Amino acid sequence: MSNDEHINQPVAEGGPGGRLKAAREAQGLSLDKIAEQLHLTIPIIQALENNDFKHLPQAVFVKGYVRNYARYLGLDTEVMMAAFVAACPDEDGKRPLKHSYNVQQQVNSGHGMVKAVTWFVVLGFIALMLLFWYDEIVQQFNPQTTDVSNGSSIENEALGFNLQPDDSGHETPTGDDGQAPTEMASENRSSAVPADNFSPLQAENTTASEAGISEAVVETSRTESVAPQQEPLASTATTAVALRFSKNSWIRVRDSAGSFRRTGLQKEGEVLTLGGKPPWQLKLGNAAAVSIEVNGRIDTGWQQHIDHRGVAEFTLNP
Amino acid sequence: MFLFPKRLRGVFSNDLSIDLGTANTLIYARGQGIVLNEPSVVAIRQDRPGGSKSVAAVGEEAKMMLGRTPGNIVAIRPMKEGVIADFTVTEKMLQYFINKVHESRLIRPSPRVLVCVPCGSTQVERRAIKESANGAGAREVYLIDEPMAAAIGAGLPVDEPRGSMVLDIGGGTSEVAIISLNGIVYANSVRIGGDRFDEAIINYVRRNYGTLIGDATAERIKHEIGSAYPGTEMLEIEVKGRNLAEGIPRSFSLNSNEILEALQEPLSGIISAVKTALEQTPPELGSDVAERGIVLTGGGALLRDLDRLLEEETGLPVIVAEDPLTCVARGGGLALELMDERGGHFLSQE
């Protein structure tokens, strides 16, 4: 076996260890001599030559032994190292370190999930800020068109004839003027009537049926006090009030029962038909641009309420 | 620049392991590997006497200036023998390096930082390193003993109930330690390192050739022909220095045997530290070391045939770790990862 043959072979059938062994034998060196020179034990040298990684320590040591061995034999250390790294089965020095006790895994700021969540929160926060800012701008601009800026939020609610006491109770706080108490009173009165109170006939029936019961004195008197109020309501069925807008105008309308309300900007050319029970509390921003029609006839009597700012605030009872 | 609190900014920063060495500073970023390897040198400019000082250059650029600066610039190595010699300059240097690693970031970085400290450093020196890392913008600072980081970085089985011996030869200090079960059983630090080798070469040349050479030349001689054990081949190098008798620069040649002779004194200091460590090691761990060997890390491990010298002196197998220069920084990075998973048992107390 010639020396050159084995050194020039990339990886012989004996693997990298086989090449070391062949080179050693070619130079006529014994295992004892090598072990003495490298300060290693004979079993380790044998394990190296037989590629027996089970009986060798960690990769860092094996690489060092191979480098020293190859250098001693005058082989190319880099080539031998590369051959051993390729032959080494499991590790290249990156074995995960074990630990003697378990400590719960902590999620730290470098964790990808934490980063993603933080970005999400930050972006969400920025989006909310933008939304809030946009709302502010819109609120500032709309009331200015009518010169009425009392800071109330824009609400466009047409509740129609909803007389549920719960609902009206919820809405009272959203009203922002000093008329809340009277509204409350009228609501209480109407809510005391359990049944639909738009039919006077029914109301009279209730009165009649309850008149005979002596215990229900209080209730009867309440129902009676409601009864006269319902007559004008009946008359609204025949009174049609319409507001025509020749220009944009900010308005606030509320009927006496609190069931019909409209607050906000009315566009040019719109017609608003008032519902609910008269009389209506009206506040017209751009009053000159509004005409009121009662049963198809134009009513001008209210125009005396227009103040120097062009705002009219009055009660309409046709 | 956004002024978010450190904790929030930390989300946008990487965890870093810093090997704040006397000669070189290495930074390992978690998940990225070694991201910075620059000399620990800062050049400070002061245009008027008593005027304000500013940083002229840091790292590689500043090292080029060492010994070649005009009057208004001073090139400083702020670390001496593994510890801080100039607190403010070290802080500036760290700040520069941390920012350099996070160069592309919009938000000022505030990483968690693990700094490797020599095991022989005092509490005051450790506190200084911690404060300077804090001052450089770190959110949290952890310290780890250098030999521990070196052993982890070299791939030693530090977690096993087996003695592993590591010898880390840095720029300013050499540390020898026996590690078992994630802890240091014995550690010793001697203030001998690459700088002392350079110094020994300068002294040798002055004594034998009557010629003065600079630090950079001495370092080049060490890299090119320095050796710790008489080898078969003799290397030669041509150097130029100022002849002390004539006062004129002269050229002369040095060979590797001369350098071997020059390095005898610092090398014997390291050998005696290793021998002391072996003497102090409990017998069970000593037999583990004798069976498997001593692992060399740090820049000093690259000195030619240092492993053979140690083998001859101790009679034990000596192994040079792969990529010995970056072992400490890589080990620190691994310790940082393990710390998150299993708690900070590797870390040294302040």
Image (cartoon, coloured by chain):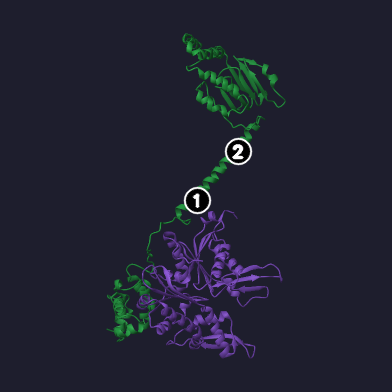
Chain colours: A green, B purple
Residue A275 visible from this viewpoint: no
Label annotation for residue A162: none
Give the residue at mark 1. Answer: A118
Q: Residues within 10 Å of mark 2 (few under 14, many from 20)?
A: few
**B92 shown above or below A150:** below
The answer to whether marks 2 and 1 sit on the same chain is: yes
Residue B85 visible from this viewpoint: yes
Does the residue at mark 2 contact the one at mark 1 (Cβ under 8 Å)? no
**A313 shown above or below B301:** above
Considering the numbered disc 1 on the image, is that residue within a helix, a strand or a loop?
helix
Distance from label 2 to label 1 (Cα)? 27 Å
Q: Chain of mark 2?
A: A
Which quarter of the rendering shows the N terminus of chain A? bottom left
Mark 1: amino acid: Thr
Q: Where residue B173 sits in the image (x, y, percent)?
A: 51, 76
Q: Where residue A186 sits in the image (x, y, percent)?
A: 56, 19
Label annotation for residue A136: 2
